[in-house]
Image (cartoon, grey):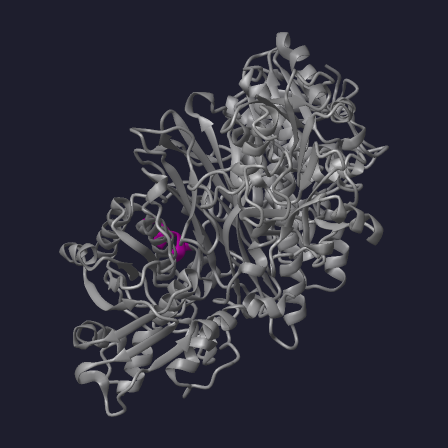
Amino acid sequence: MSELSSPPHPPGVEDALALGLTRAEYELVCEKQGRAPNQVELAMYSLMWSEHCAYKHSKKLLRTLPTEGEHVVMGPGENAGAVDVGDGMVCAFKVESHNHPSAVEPFQGAATGVGGILRDIFAIGARPIAVLDSLRFGEPASTNTGERARYLLDGAVSGIGHYGNSIGVPTVGGEVYFEAPYEQSCLVNAMALGLARRDRLVRSAAAGLGNVVILFGASTGRDGIGGASVLASAELGGEGEDAQEKRPTVQVGDPFEEKKLLECSLELLERELLVSLQDLGAAGLTSSASEMASKGVVGIDIDVAAVPLREQGMEPFEVMVSESQERMLCVVEPANVDAVMALCAKWEVNGAVIGTVTDTQRMRILRDGQLVGDMPVRALVDDCPLYELEPQKPQQPLYTAPTATLSAGTGPAETLLALVSSPNLASRRPLFEQYDAIVQSRTVRRPEQADAAVLALPGTVGGARGALAVSIDCNGRRVAADPYWGTVGAVLECASNLACVGAEPLGTTNNLNFGNPEKAHIAWQLSESVRGLGDACRALRAPIVGGNVSLYNEGAAGPIYPTPVIGMVGRLPDASRAGSLGFARSGDEIALVGPFAPSLAGSELAKLHGEALPDGLPEVDLAKAGVALEGVRDAVRRGSLSSAHDVAEGGLAVALAECCLAGSVGARIELDDAFWEEIAPVASGGRSLSPQAALMAALFGEGPGGFVLSGASAAIRELGARTRVLRLGTVGGEELVIATTGANAGPSSGPSIVTTLLQLDEAHAALRRLFP
Amino acid sequence: MKFGILQFPGSCDEVDALDAARRVGDAELIWHAERDLKGCDAIVVPGGFSYGDYLRAGAIARFSRVMESVIAFASEGGLVLGICNGFQVLCEARLLPGALLPNANLRFTFRQVDLEVLQADTSFTCACALGERLSIPAKHSWGRYYADERTLSDMDAAGQIVLAYAAGENFNGSLRDIAGVRNEAGNVFGLMPHPEHAVSELLGGSTGGLKIFQSMRMAVEGVHA
C-alpha cells in the first residue's frame, strides 16, 4: 500500500466551515485522524457528520421510540423496516423526505424522492409494491403566493407520477395540505412498501475478508454533489438567486435505469449471488460504503479509478460524494463475480468491481492504487458528536393567524360547502388521477374508495386472501397547536384509517419534518412530538420500524408547521371484506361511533374564520380510542357494515358529506336528544354557548376517536357493548339533510343543512379549477 | 392455447397480462432479446415503457429482436394483442394504422372508463355482444388516437374500429372516440385501456377485460367462425 499522497493545497478549518461542519467538529475530525484531513477525507466527514446522515440533533430522541413488537422483523437501522405479514412473507416499508430538492426543482426533486425510497425497499430484497406521498405547500388560492404553491404542487405530482408510473409501482394513496407556513419550505415525503419472502431478506453489513465490492447501475457524474450537507442540513435562503444557485445540487432521475436496476438486484438476490446489498442515496458512495463497513465491523478499500464515470476529469472527492441516482453497491464472493457481471449485462446496467473488504476497519480511498484518503470507519460513521436539544416552550405564538376566507356568522349549510371546497378538503382526484394506482394487480381499494389503501397479498390462508392496508397522515396545524396531542392525533388518524378497512396495525414509519432544532422552540416542538409519537405507538401496539428526519425546514418567514408524517401498515385477514367509505345501501342506519369529542380549536373551520392557533388541544383518552378502533375493525372484518369512515378535518358534517359523495347517495340525519346530551357538553368545552354556536361546534368540530358507520341497525347497535354509539339517521335520497329534533331543535324548526349531491360534488371538485 | 407475453426491460404490466391470460389458458413471458416465440398461439405486447420511451412511446421497441419475430408471426395470421404501450409499439411497427399522440390534457391520466363494443365479430371481441359496455381502466400519457380522415373513413367502412370510448369517457381526445382498432386482416388488435386490469371482482370490481382474452381463446380454438 502506498503512502497517502498529499495534494498541493490541503484544506483548512475555513473549508470545513463552508462544508457545514462546526469549528469544534473540525477539531474532533483532526483528533480522530491524528492530523488535518485532506480534501477527500474532509468531504467525506462533512457528509457523514451532517444532520442528514448522523441525526446529530435527533438521535437521542429517536432512541425513546418503541421499536419492538410481535410482528417486527427488521427495525430501525436498516435501509427499511419490515413486519411479518404471515405465510412466510414480510412487508418492508419506509417514508423519506425530499423537501429541499423539491423546493429548488419540484419535478426532479419529487421524482428522485420516489426513486430513493424505492431503492431503500429493494435494497433489503423486497419487491416494491406501492408508493404513497405526503405533500405540503403554501395556500394555492392566495393572490400573492398561490402561483408558486400551484407550480410546486404541479411539478411534484408530475414528478412522482413520472417515476412511479414508469417503473411500474402503483401510487395508491397520499395526502396534501396547503398552509401558509409551507410557502417557503414545501414538504415532499414519499413512502414505499415492498414484499419479500422472510428467508430472502438481505442486510447491508459488509462481510468476508477479500470479498469484492461491486458498484452497479447508472454511471457517476457531478450531479447532486453535496446534497446531504448543503441542501438537507441547512435552511434554504428563499426562492430567488439562491434556489437558482442550488439547482445543480438536485439530481435528475431516470426511472428506466432504476427499473432495470430493480429487476437486476432482485434477480441477483434470487440467485443468492450477493453477501450484502446497499443503495446509494444521500452522500453517495461515501455513505453507502462506510455504512456497510460499519455494520460489518470491517474495512473497505475503494479505487475511484474503477468507478464508471459519465464526466471527464472527476476528482476522487467528487466520485466519493456524487449523488448520481440509480446506483447500488454490493459485496460478492470472488467466485460469484462473473455471474454477477453476466446478470448486469442481461439487464444492461453497468457493473464494476471498485473495491475489496478488508480487516482494517478503515475506509481507504485509492486512485489507480495511490492512496488518497484513509479514515477509521468508526470515526466516520459513529463518532459524530450528538447534541442535546435545549427545548423551551415559546412564550409568544410562533405562527400568525391565517387569512380569513369565510365570515364568522356564516350558517351551517354554506359553511359545509365552503369546507368541502376548501383546498385542504376538496377532492384530490385531479392529483391522484396522474398516478397509476393499479399496476401489479394488487389494489383492492383505490384512492377515495376507502380511508386506507388496500393491497391484496399473494396466496391464501384458510381459503381467504389476506391484504395489507396502508395510510399516511399528519395534520401539521394541529401539531403546531399542540405538538404532543397533535402527534398523538396523527397516529390515531392512521390507525383509524386502517380500522375502517378492517386492518390492525403491524408497524409504523415516520418522517419528522421540523424547523431548525438549534432553536429552543423548535427543539420543544420536536421533543414533545416525539414523546406523543412514542406514547401513541405504544398504546396502539404499532411499533416504529424505521423513519427519517428532515430538519431546518424554515426560511426568513419562519418555520414550517411541525409535521411528523406518520405512515402505518396493517393487515386484514380477508381482502374481499375490506371496508369502503361510501354509503352503499338505501335504508341503512347511520351512526356516530366512538369517544368523539368535537372541538373547533385548531379546526379547518377555525382556519377559514382566520382564527389564530390555540395554545394546546384537548387531551385524548388513548385507551378509549383504542377500544373504539378495535370495535370498528372487528365489525368491518365480520362484513357486517356497509361503510366505515373516520371523522377528521371538517368534523362530523364533512365526514357525512364524504360518505355521500363516495357512495353517490344522500342521507337524512336527525340530531336528537341523545346526541345532544353526549355531544353538546364536549363541543361547548364546558362554556355556555348559544344553540347556534353549539350546533356549529357539533357539526364542524374536530378531534380523534369518531367514526361514521352505516349498515344494518342490529350490526351497529352491537358495537354499543364496546364503545359509544349514537344513532344519526338513514342512507337514501339525493340530498344530505341534517336536522335537529327534540328539545335542542330551537325556535327555528327545520333542517340546518339541506344540500343536493350535485351541490356537494361541485364544491368538492374545487381543486379541478385550481389545477386545470 | 398458449399466450406469449413480451417482456421488455421497461415493461410494467407484463405480469398482470400473464396472470390475466392464465385465467383462460396457458401463458409465458418472452424476453425482448429472444427470437423464439416458443410455439405460442397468440402474442400480447403489454403495457409499460418498453425501453424507457424517452424518445417516443414504442419507437425503439419496434426494432427489438422479439418484434422481428412478432411481425413475421402477424404476417402469417397469428393473433397479436397490443395493450397501451403495446398498442403504441404495434402502431410504430405499422402492424396497425394510425398513431397515439399525447393526451389532450397533456398529463398522465388514470381513469376507469366505459368502452362500447362496435364490432363483436372479431377475434378479440367475439365473446362480447354488439353494443356491450365494458368497464376497463385506462392509464397513459400518450393515448390520443390519430389517423388522417381518409384512413379513418376506410377503417370505419372495413369495421376496423372495434372499441370506442362511451359518451363522456374519451378523456384523451382520441379521434372518433377510438379506444381500440384492428388491422385489415383482423389478426392484430390494439387498445389503450388495460383489459388485463379488469379480470377480477376483488381488484376493481369489473371483469369486462377478461372477455378480450376469452375471445382470443375462442378464435384460436375455432369456436369463433
Image quadrant where one finds the N terminus of chain A: top right
Image quadrant where one finds the C terminus of chain A: bottom right
Quarter of the image for residue A455 reads top left
Write the start and end of the magenta stretch as one range: A527-534
Judge by depth and name the residue closer to the eye, A494 or A483.
Answer: A494
In percent of the image, x 27 and y 53: which residue is there? A641
In percent of the image, x 81 and y 36: which residue is there? B94
Q: Is residue A354 above or below residue A142?
A: above
Judge by depth and name the residue closer to the eye, A643 or A208.
Answer: A643
Judge by depth and name the residue closer to the eye, A665 or A438.
Answer: A665
* Left or right: B51, with A20 as reference point: right
From this viewpoint, which residue is outermost toward the left?
A: A721
x%, y% of residue A428?
A: 53, 60
x%, y% of residue B192?
A: 66, 44
Tell me, yes or no, if residue A361 can be seen here. Answer: no
x%, y% of residue A408?
A: 42, 86
In percent of the image, x 26 and y 86: which residue is there? A691
* Left or right: A9, with A560 as reference point: right
Residue A531 forms part of the magenta stretch: yes
From this viewpoint, which residue is outermost toward the bottom?
A: A747
x%, y% of residue A349?
A: 71, 26
From this viewpoint, which residue is outermost toward the right?
A: A312
Judge by depth and name the residue closer to the eye, A226 or A750.
Answer: A750
Q: Is residue B43 above or below residue A744?
A: above
Magenta: main secondary structure = helix
Tell me, yes or no, if residue A85 can be seen here. Answer: yes
Query: How many marks can you see?
Result: 0
